[in-house]
């Protein structure tokens, strides 16, 4: 991402749920400032709640350096609490190179010296028409937050035999696109015939998702969930635990990653189709958040994600039904209570 910003000629669009004023945040700010100083149009959009710990002086410093910046849904503008949040993580350079996935701008994502060690996350770089689509997604959030609209003329239709992966930019924001995004993921699960391997950081899915995963396992699909063993939000982990018994009984295999805090959001199906982005398998992502994911149709990329999944399993503990039934009464009670809170987490 630093290299892409350093090579920008015309425009940098950066959208992040969290943009921290720490060593990694300052490093990114310096690179954005250098781009602005050489005449590149730089725009930054961050979520007001996700970036709550970042003081106003940081944003003023950013603007003094020639960077246009806005916060999505400031907390004290209108209602004191606003559930609609911008959870996207996008970087688009010159509308030709794009990055997205689970990584915010903060030391836990970008430094080996982070307290407790760096987090395990997945972020991807794309080049070509998908980056233009990500710029369109940025423009939607940017104008919602009060930024002037960006001129984005229609992109010329690519040749059908253009080399490279076929990519669908799958985005949603509150009140628009949530059902379509959910339906796309349901269609992928329904179409899987051999493997459906899912990595997710915050798993509190509800009964419908359990039924969909169980249906895939019932028809012989190898359904695996890789979930956090270490987390920054314990109550969400416990809410996910409330669904484990039902999933395990129906043949879904569950693993908890132990080597670091797991923050990745990815899916790979049948060694062919992959999804990487910002969406968690919880109520918030499908009801209240602006999200962006890439659906990638490409054998080499899907195979790479499968290898990564297998490497992560080497650092994970499998949850089995006999051992799960032996967890303590306190653990069971916490799981039940957290599961009841799933719709508001």
Image (cartoon, rainbow, N blue to C red):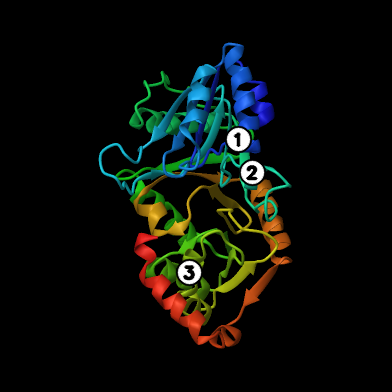
Q: Position of residue 169 (x, y in %)?
A: 48, 39
| Residue in front for this viewpoint, 154 or 1 | 1
Dot 3 or dot 2, earlier in sequence:
2
| In the depicted structure, whether residue 310 falls above or below residue 51 | below
- Can residue 7 be seen in the rendering of this structure? yes
| Horizontal arrangement in the rendering, residue 338 relative to residue 259 (left or right) | left
Question: Dot 1: what SS?
Answer: helix
Q: Which is more foreground, mark 3 or mark 1?
A: 1
Q: Position of residue 148 (x, y in %)?
A: 37, 20
| Horizontal arrangement in the rendering, residue 76 relative to residue 29 (left or right) | left
Measured Cα–Cα span from mark 3 to mark 2: 27 Å
Tag 2 residue: 107
Structural crowding at the residue carrying mark 1, measured as other residues with C-alpha within 10 Å and reported as few (<14), some (14–19) or many (≥20): some
Do labels 2 and 1 touch, CB within 8 Å? yes
Measured Cα–Cα span from mark 2 to mark 1: 7 Å
Dot 2 or dot 1, earlier in sequence:
1
Give me the disc on residue 25: 1
- Can residue 132 be seen in the rendering of this structure? no
Tag 3 residue: 240
Do labels 3 and 2 touch, CB within 8 Å? no
| Image point (46%, 59%), residue name | 281
Structural crowding at the residue carrying mark 3, measured as other residues with C-alpha within 10 Å and reported as few (<14), some (14–19) or many (≥20): many
| Residue in front for this viewpoint, 180 or 87 | 87
């Amino acid at each position: 991402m630093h290299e892409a910003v350093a090579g920008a000629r015309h425009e940098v669009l950066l959208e992040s749920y969290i943009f921290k004023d720490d060593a990694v945040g300052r490093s990114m700010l310096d690179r954005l400032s250098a781009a602005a100083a050489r005449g590149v149009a730089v725009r930054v959009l961050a979520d007001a709640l996700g970036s709550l710990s970042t003081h106003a002086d940081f944003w003023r410093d950013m603007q003094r350096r020639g960077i246009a910046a806005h916060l999505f849904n400031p907390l004290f503008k209108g209602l004191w609490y606003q559930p609609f949040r911008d959870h996207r993580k996008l970087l688009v350079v010159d509308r030709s190179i794009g990055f997205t996935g689970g990584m915010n701008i903060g030391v836990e994502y970008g430094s080996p010296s982070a307290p407790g060690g760096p987090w395990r996350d997945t972020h991807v770089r794309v080049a070509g028409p998908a980056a233009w689509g990500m710029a369109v997604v940025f423009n939607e959030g940017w104008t919602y937050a009060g930024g002037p609209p960006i001129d984005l003329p229609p992109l010329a239709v690519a040749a059908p035999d253009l080399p490279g992966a076929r990519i669908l930019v799958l985005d949603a924001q509150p009140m628009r696109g949530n059902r379509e995004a959910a339906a796309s993921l349901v269609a992928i699960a329904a179409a899987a015939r051999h493997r459906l391997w899912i990595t997710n950081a915050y798993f509190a899915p509800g009964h419908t998702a359990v039924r969909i995963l169980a249906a895939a396992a019932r028809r012989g699909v190898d359904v695996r969930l890789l979930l956090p063993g270490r987390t920054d939000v314990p109550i969400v982990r416990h809410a996910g635990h409330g669904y484990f018994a039902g999933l395990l009984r129906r043949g879904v295999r569950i693993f908890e990653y132990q080597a670091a805090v797991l923050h990745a959001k990815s899916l790979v199906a049948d060694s062919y189709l992959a999804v990487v982005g910002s969406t968690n398998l919880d109520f918030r992502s499908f009801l209240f958040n602006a999200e962006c994911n890439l659906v990638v149709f490409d054998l080499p990329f899907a195979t790479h994600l499968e290898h990564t999944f297998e490497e992560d399993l080497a650092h994970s503990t499998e949850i089995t039904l006999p051992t799960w039934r032996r967890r303590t009464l306190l653990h069971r009670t916490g799981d039940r209570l957290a599961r009841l809170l799933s719709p508001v987490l």
